Image: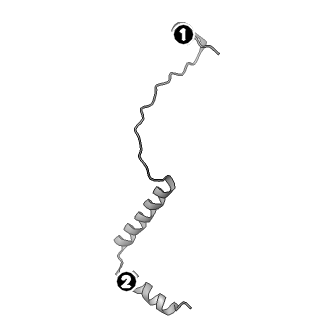
């Protein structure tokens, strides 16, 4: 059976040793671990993007001697 008085005493002793800085550090560490577990661990690659030009009008195609085949 669980001794709640003993548990309360142990919890009070642990919390008495903590400061706001250590509690904040612990909390931030927990958040980071949760974030990493959500994304998963791995390598991130820097992949260059390709430039895509959006053609707005038919006149733009005619001016630039371009065509679109559909």
Is 69 left or right of 15, judged from the image as shown? Answer: right
Residue at label 2? Answer: 16
Crowding at mark 2 (Cα within 10 Å: few <14, some 14-19, many 20+): few
- Residue 17, given in percent of the width and then of the height, sits at 35, 81
Of the 4 image quadrants, the one containing the N terminus is: bottom right
Q: Nearer the viewer, residue 67 or 21?
A: 67
Q: Secondary structure at mark 1?
A: loop
Residue displayed at 42% across by 67% down: 27
Please, which residue is most extreme toward the front here?
42
Query: How has the structure been colored for display?
Result: one colour
Closer to us: mark 2 or mark 1? 1
Number of numbered discs = 2
State how far apart marks 2 and 1 are (Cα): 75 Å
- Residue 63, given in percent of the width and then of the height, sits at 53, 7
Of the 4 image quadrants, the one containing the C terminus is: top right
Is 4 left or right of 27, judged from the image as shown? Answer: right
Q: Image height check: is 26 above or below 3?
A: above
Is 70 left or right of 38, judged from the image as shown? Answer: right
Crowding at mark 1 (Cα within 10 Å: few <14, some 14-19, many 20+): few
Is 61 left or right of 29, judged from the image as shown? Answer: right
- Residue 43, given in percent of the width and then of the height, sits at 41, 46
Q: Secondary structure at mark 2?
A: helix
Q: Image height check: is 41 above or below 12?
A: above
Residue at label 1? Answer: 66
């Amino acid at each position: 059976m669980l001794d709640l008085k003993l548990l309360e005493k142990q919890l009070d002793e642990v919390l008495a040793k903590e400061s706001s800085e250590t509690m904040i550090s612990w909390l931030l560490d927990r958040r980071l671990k949760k974030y990493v577990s959500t994304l998963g661990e791995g390598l991130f690659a820097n992949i260059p993007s390709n430039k895509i030009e959006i053609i707005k009008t038919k006149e733009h195609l005619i001016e630039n001697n371009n065509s679109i085949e559909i």
